Image (cartoon, rainbow, N blue to C red):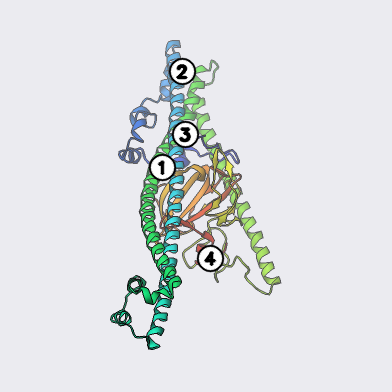
Amino acid sequence: MRSGPVESDCGCGPTPSELRALHGGVTRRTVVVAGALGALIAGFASGPGDPAFAAKYPTWDDVERARRNEASKNAEIARIETLIRSLQSDVEAKQAEAERLGQEHVLAVEAYEDAVDRAEALQAQADAESARAEAAAQKLGILITEQYRSGKRDPALELFFSGEPGSADDLLSRLGTMDRLVEANREVYADAAGARDNAQSLSAQAEVARAERDRRKNDAEKKMQAAQTAAQAALVALETQSEHRDVLEAQLAALRDTTAITVADYQTGVEVRRRERAERIRRERAAAAARAREEERRRQEEREQAANAGGGGTGGNSAGGGAASGGGQVQPSGWVRPAHGGVTSYFGSRGTICSNGYCTASGHRGLDFAASCGAPIYAAASGTVTFAGWSGSWGNYIKILHSDGSTTAYAHILNGGYNVSYGQRVRAGQLIAYAGTTGASTGCHLHFEVYRDGVRVDPAAHLRNRGVRV
């Protein structure tokens, strides 16, 4: 599997301080504990993210001392070069593992949904055949009743009416012993018996399909946990790299420098670059948010103009009686529109999309909101983050479990664009991430999903029923 792309749309990479804030719930201890569930993290226990390894990072005093001796300087240069390579290798290995398990999670969810569809389809067919058998048996019973009432007395008829059959199967069993009486209605009887047999066969198949559905659901849940554990390990590795890479490269430059620039000058330069990068990210994200809000304001004006021109109708995108809502505005129901932009693709079928080394299936089980790169993404309701990490074709991905049992999901998040972490409680309308184009995505947007019992349902209907305009 090809590694996910490096986000370059707006240069919004996280600073070390941002990473610590964004992933405050993800510590090296929690990753090691999570890794105890399997060998996933244990394989990387001696990498740069390990506390014992971290103790080997040079200080600026080490660099200052090494500059005074050529042999010490060369040794320190080799040491720092090794550390930089190790940091990069650690990030790449853990990101590759997170990508692998993330895609397994995607495929497991899709397999579970397919199993649910098959079980429901088989049961629907079984129910239809049962209804057909019941109707045919009742029809045959009526015909025989008419024979009885017409005065055609027969011991077999007396036997037939001696008890009340409780079901189509009981009725057909009684009728099956009455060859002479059924003979004239053989076609009706055959149809009823065939429907009964089909219903029994389909019910058995549906039972097997439900067992497969339950197995797939369990598998999807396990794959999500494995992907989350790997994603946390990758985030810690990236955080470790971000914390140390700038310093190590500045220390390396200081050791190689033969001019009068001091070690203190290099140390100051690192801090200046960090502040500049943080300020640039802040400005770019603020500008993206402002653009998104302006776009939503323009769309709202167009909707109001269209409604006024049409005599006050609400149109096809009505919020079910609720007030119009921009992204992040909490409605009386406690639910929120998760982004500012308009909807560009609804729940249903569409062509396969391939991008960044991933392909989507033809079904589109979500709602796409237009959003510029770095635009804010809001929690659709209060809840707990149950997933935050890479997940294959969904790219950077967040899932939130809500009190009503539903789960919302947010895909294609910007690299470094998480604003919450696994296990964190969030409130409705809280800024949780920034829009990107990771995974199977051809441009920055938010792909928004709603799950019920592990299966994705139409998010537009879900939001409208809660007073949110989409």
Image coords of residue 44 (percent x, y): 37, 31
Which callout, 3 or 4, points at the residue further toward the start of the chain?
A: 3
Count neighbours of disc 1 (C-alpha within 10 A) and say few if under 14, some if 14 to 19, many if 20 or more: many
Looking at the picture, tell me which residue is in the foreground, 66 or 191. 191
Count neighbours of disc 3 (C-alpha within 10 A) and say few if under 14, some if 14 to 19, many if 20 or more: some
Image quadrant holding the C terminus, namely bottom right
Which residue shows up at 60% across the image and 44% down it?
A: 442
User: Of the residues shown, which amino acid type is indicated by label 1?
Assistant: Ala
Q: Are marks 2 and 3 in contact (CB under 8 Å)?
A: no
Looking at the picture, tell me which residue is in the foreground, 61 or 239. 239
Rounded to the nearest angstrom, the CA distance separating label 3 from label 4 is 42 Å
Numbered disc total: 4
Which callout, 2 or 3, points at the residue further toward the start of the chain?
A: 2
Of the two numbered discs 3 and 4 in the rendering, the one whose residue sits closer to the viewer: 4
Of the two numbered discs 2 and 1 in the rendering, the one whose residue sits closer to the viewer: 1
Which callout, 4 or 2, points at the residue further toward the start of the chain?
A: 2
Image coords of residue 450 (percent x, y): 48, 57
The reply, left or right, for residue 29 in relation to residue 321 is left
Rounded to the nearest angstrom, the CA distance separating label 3 from label 1 is 22 Å
Where is mark 4, residue-wise? 464
Q: Secondary structure at mark 1?
A: helix
Image coords of residue 305 (percent x, y): 69, 67
Rounded to the nearest angstrom, the CA distance separating label 1 from label 4 is 32 Å
Where is mark 1, residue-wise? 227
Quarter of the image for residue 100 reads top left
Where is mark 3, residue-wise? 242
Of the two numbered discs 4 and 2 in the rendering, the one whose residue sits closer to the viewer: 4
Q: Secondary structure at mark 3?
A: helix
